Amino acid sequence: MGKNAGMTDAPTVLLCGQWPATEAARWRQALQRALPEVRWCEPADLQDQPGLASEVSIAVVANPPAGALTGLPNLRFIQSLWAGVERLLADPTLPPRLPVARMVDPAMNTAMAETAAWAVLSLHRRYFDYRQQQDRAEWRPWPQRRADEVPVLVLGRGQMGTAVARTLAGLGYPVTAWGREDRRGALATGSARTPDGDEALPVHVVAGPQALQAALPAHEVVVNLLPLTPQTAGLIDAAFLAALPPGAALVNLARGAHVVEHALRDALDRGHLRHAVLDVFAVEPLPPDSPWWRHPGVTVLPHAAAATDPRSASAVVAANVRALLEGRPLAHLVDRQRGY
């Protein structure tokens, strides 16, 4: 795989994923630069070098094909390059007790917060409507509302949800952050301060199904950043959308399976929902004949809200691999029962 491929006294790390050749090359270069002291290999090397599979102790993966991690008897740890791990956990051949860590990259959190801020600002200030008016050569200014008149509900209180909630609060929006469970985290229910003790931005934090039902009618924009689990799949259904106030908007930056698509289309067609910004879909890439491309109430992004940056993410991988090798606690381990 590179100049360190002949190192036999170093830990062997398998890099395995499904990505275009150019992207794979970027990741190889970044990871080798961040972690030069290990021996890197790829699935093709396992086929070409008998016995190499038994030397692999760590796998760094990006949605590897099902079964790709079988036949590695000494595998100790799996580090995902992606924040979402639902496809990885769905592989029935995944060793059941092996620790798995997901990618939590501060640079990616910042990028997601930037996209969410763009979407909420565009909805608030009617920029999507102005875009359509420009196509019609229509000069029509809309009344300009203040940010504190546009309440925003952020679904998800993990790293990305926290970054988004704090960014939107910093722009002056009234923000509620909802989580399915009341767990300690960066935004803990009832907490008035950040984990390091600094004054927190005014984010109202709630948890549980009843709190969600109470929050929906009071929020004009919903930003979804939930992990995809059996409990959250299909959460944004007809009942969810009907509970929102007329003229509300949805920003889905998490997974397409969170949304019941026909229910969303119906809510948009009836005018109950004003607009939807969709970065993720049930089928990706979005087929050319999908109605989402041409729906006047939908803005389509090609799963581009926050791309994982090999430069920063490689440093996260290196830190966790070194922690394993030095016997220190691993960061961002996945709870398999919860699915994230």
Image: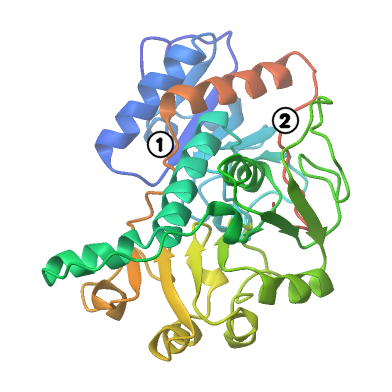
Q: Quadrant of residue 25?
A: top left
Badge 1 amino acid = Gln
Of helix, strand and loop, which one carries label 2? loop
Query: Which quarter of the figure has residue 213?
Result: bottom right
At horizontal 43% and vertical 61% (from top left) the residue drawn is 123
Residue 287 versus residue 197 in the image, above or below:
below
Circle 1 residues within 10 Å: few <14, some 14–19, many ≥20? few
Where residue 133 sits in the image (x, y, percent)?
20, 69
Q: Is residue 266 above or below residue 160?
A: below
Residue 276 picture location, percent across and down: 42, 70
Report how many numbered discs are placed on residues in the image. 2
State yes or no: discs 1 and 2 in contact (Cβ < 8 Å).
Answer: no
Residue at 42% from the left image edge and 59% from the top image edge: 144
Mark 1 residue element = helix
Q: Nearer the viewer, mark 1 or mark 2?
A: 2
Tell me the kind of residue under disc 2. Ala
Q: Nearer the viewer, residue 35 or 109?
A: 109
Q: Image quadrant for the N terminus?
A: top left
Residue corresponding to mark 1:
47
The quadrant in which residue 201 appears is: top right
Seen at 79% across and 53% down, the residue is: 205
The colouring scheme, among rainbow, by chain, secondary structure or one colour, is rainbow
Q: Nearer the viewer, residue 141 or 284?
A: 141
- Observer-nearest residue: 313 or 253? 253
**In this picture, residue 188 sits left or right of residue 5:** right
Left or right position of 271 against 128: right
Image x and y of residue 202, in percent: 74, 44
Q: What distance separates the C-alpha of mark 1 from that of mark 2?
A: 31 Å
Q: Position of residue 208 (x, y in %)?
A: 82, 67
Res 331 label: 2
Up the image or down, 85 lies above or below 287; here it is: above
Residue 293 visible, this orientation: yes
